[in-house]
Image (spheres, rainbow, N blue to C red):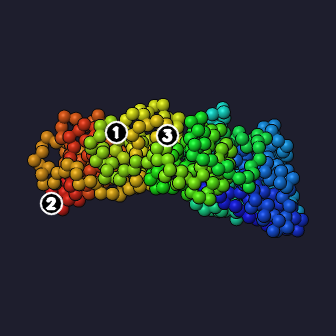
Amino acid sequence: MFFQQYYLECLSHASYMVGDTTTGHAAVVDPQRDIQQYLDDARENGLTITKVIETHFHADFLSGHLELAEATGAAIVYGRAAEGRVEFPADYVDHGSHISLGTVDLEILETPGHTPESISVVVRENGPTGTPHAVLTGDTLFIGDVGRPDLLVSVGVTADDLAHQLYASLHTKLLTLPDSTLVYPAHGAGSSCGKQLSTETVSTIGEQRRTNYALAPMVVDDFVEIVTEGQNVAPLYFPFAANRNRQARPLHDDDAPVIELRLNEVLSLQKNGAVIIDSRDDLAFAVGHIRGSVNVGLGGRFAEYVGEIMHPGTSIVLVTDPGKEQESRTRLARIGFDNVLGALHNPIASMMENPAAVDKLSRLSVEALAERMASVRDLVVIDVRNGGETALGMLPGARNIPLPALLMTLPELDRHVPVVVNCAGGYRSAIASSLLKSQGFTDVSDLIGGYNAWATSNIPQSLPTIAVREVSQHPDAVLLDCREQEEWDEAHIDGAVLIPMIQLPDRLNEIDKNKEIICVCRSGNRSGKVAAWLLNNGYRAVNMTGGMLAWKEAGLPVT
């Protein structure tokens, strides 16, 4: 048997080729759109691709089923529930049916739940009665997670109904396979098709039975609740890609040249509605870029993030590092964004020769942001991380707008107030801040190093402070403890008020604005940042230097 997993890191996408070396027949499952690797491996191993099997209508990438069928003459195969829903010739298979490649056998299991038409493919080396070697689970079962059931709500399929189907698919079909059966899913960590996928790309049924939170013993109602809650906002392009995967769309030609454009042509296209996507890294973009362009670095999840911040079908002009034009276009094609008009010829020279067309990206250090919080009224902080990330902490007063929701939230935001954007490490905030600038926001910066830098950095020395032994001289001040509940329970200052930093924006009305606020935390870092934010919001706030560590070291009483 020939068996190969192809893992595409930038989309967390796994596809497969299974072949019988005795007959030379092979099937490709859930292929990516640029298909050369499958053709090369088939040729090198004496295989002919006769089937292209789709486990479901994918939403996070555009499948290469049409490209493979055109290149090889292979039949495209779906589960029976997909019948009548595609615009191109396809074969449909029922639950329990078998596709024979020779001695290698592929059994089809209908496993709805992520989508109604989802299937899984059981691979056996020794015919239909042999012991299962592996199961290709598509988006039904991941390593450490299961497929999210909420992506079809917009088209009238409820998450509750699909979650019930998912429970049955897992327990009456996949979990009946032997524990030794290898599990090969269609996605890994980073995919938006689940919420806590593992970085591992293969497991076993037995291991998942023991370790996967969604497979723990529970009644169906508890399962429905646990798999529907806490899902991140789906990328904007998901419905587009899912529909595109059912259509008889144009084929992708990976070898077609990318048209070179002069700057005047780029600016003319931009004026007529094209979006300039600059795929250089955020540092190069910050130094200089074409005014109004949006930075999505090629080094990250480039295509997915482009799909989160622009409407499908929008015309695109690329600005890239030298030699990266083709890769940038290919990666966009993988999500169906085919409307690339060309790429700017020699970007650095073009910008140096036309400085009037160039802008810079404003970036703030943690210290600069804290000082700005303390001095700039009406400052808006936008956190573009997902909900699961913000649960661990946010900047004081930040508004959480996950990146996939930012474009649709723009009408709610004031374009004329100062805005600072943060994410976890700075990659997504560069995307978001450049998007805001391109949409007419006048004063936009992003936080260098993101929330990770904020959480681990020291506070600026310019903020007002108070020593622990001076606190008693301010009997009318409010002692605001911004630590977490477990830290407070261990020891706190008698008379202090506990409002954890992450809760502060929602509980600000509990603090008397007419009193001085002394901010307290463990060491003085969190409280310094809270003090900066309170100053920005019109409070008289000071930071207690050294926090509770200094308080205890001075021998002062705690409760």
Element under label 3?
helix
Give whichever of discs 2 and 3 has the lower sequence position: 3
Residue 438 - label: 3
Task: For marks 2 and 3, give the one nearer the viewer.
Answer: 3
Is 85 left or right of 534, judged from the image as shown?
right
Residue located beneath label 1 in the image? 379
**Residue 384, position in %: x, y?**
47, 45
Q: Nearer the viewer, residue 162 or 382?
A: 382
Q: Position of residue 283 (x, y in %)?
A: 46, 56
Q: Position of residue 475 (x, y in %)?
A: 12, 43
Amino acid marked by disc 1: Leu
Closer to the camera: disc 3 or disc 1?
3
Alpha-carbon span between mark 2 and mark 3: 55 Å
Mark 3 → mark 1, Cα distance in angstroms: 19 Å
Residue lying at 49% horizontally and 35% vertically, measured from the top left: 409
Residue at the spot x=32%, y=41% of the render? Answer: 504
Q: Residue at x 20, y 59 (%)?
A: 550
Q: Earlier in the sequence, mark 2 or mark 1?
A: 1
Report x, y in % for residue 359: 45, 46
Sequence-earlier tag: 3 or 1: 1
Residue tagged 2: 555
